[in-house]
Image (cartoon, rainbow, N blue to C red):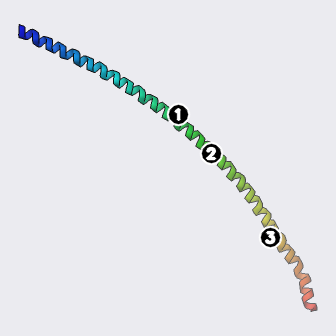
Amino acid sequence: PETWAKFSHDNIYRAEREKLASINLRALIDNILHDVSEDLRMQCAAVNEAFAKRCEELDDAKHKLEHHLKKILKEIGDQEANIAALKQAIKDKEAPMKVAQTRL
């Protein structure tokens, strides 16, 4: 009976220690999970902010490129009109040039 009582007492003591260790471990795990959750939320917010900023930068760059393209296309059209006008001017002067050459 004495051995049985000591054995039971030791088992109860170990069980209490394990229970306390388990409570401490669960508290630690809960704190870690809370910290990880907060870190993930903060990282998510940072990523969303950076992504939104990058989208805004891309949209701005797109508008600038579209404006530049419109300007370049207008300049190309103007130059094509100049080329056509020069060709017409050369063509218009061919007949008087032939007359001048035959008189020489």
Q: Quadrant of the N terminus?
A: top left
> What secondary structure is found at the residue carrying circle 2?
helix
- Among numbered discs 3 and 1, the one appearing first in the sequence: 1
SS of the residue under disc 1: helix
Relative height, residue 66 to residue 33 (above, below): below
| Amino acid under disc 1 | Ala
Residue positioned 45% across, 32% down in the render: 39
- Which of the numbered marks, if any, corresponds to residue 45? 1
Q: Quadrant of the C terminus?
A: bottom right
The residue depicted at 10 percent of the width and 11 percent of the height is 6
92 lies above or below 32: below
How far apart are labels 3 and 1 at the CA level? 56 Å
CA gap, disc 2 to disc 3?
38 Å
Residue under the image location 38 percent in, 24 percent down: 31
Circle 2 residue: 57
Q: Dot 3, how many residues are within 10 Å of its Cα: few (below 14), some (14-19), or many (20+)?
A: few
Residue 44 x, y percent position in the rendering: 50, 34
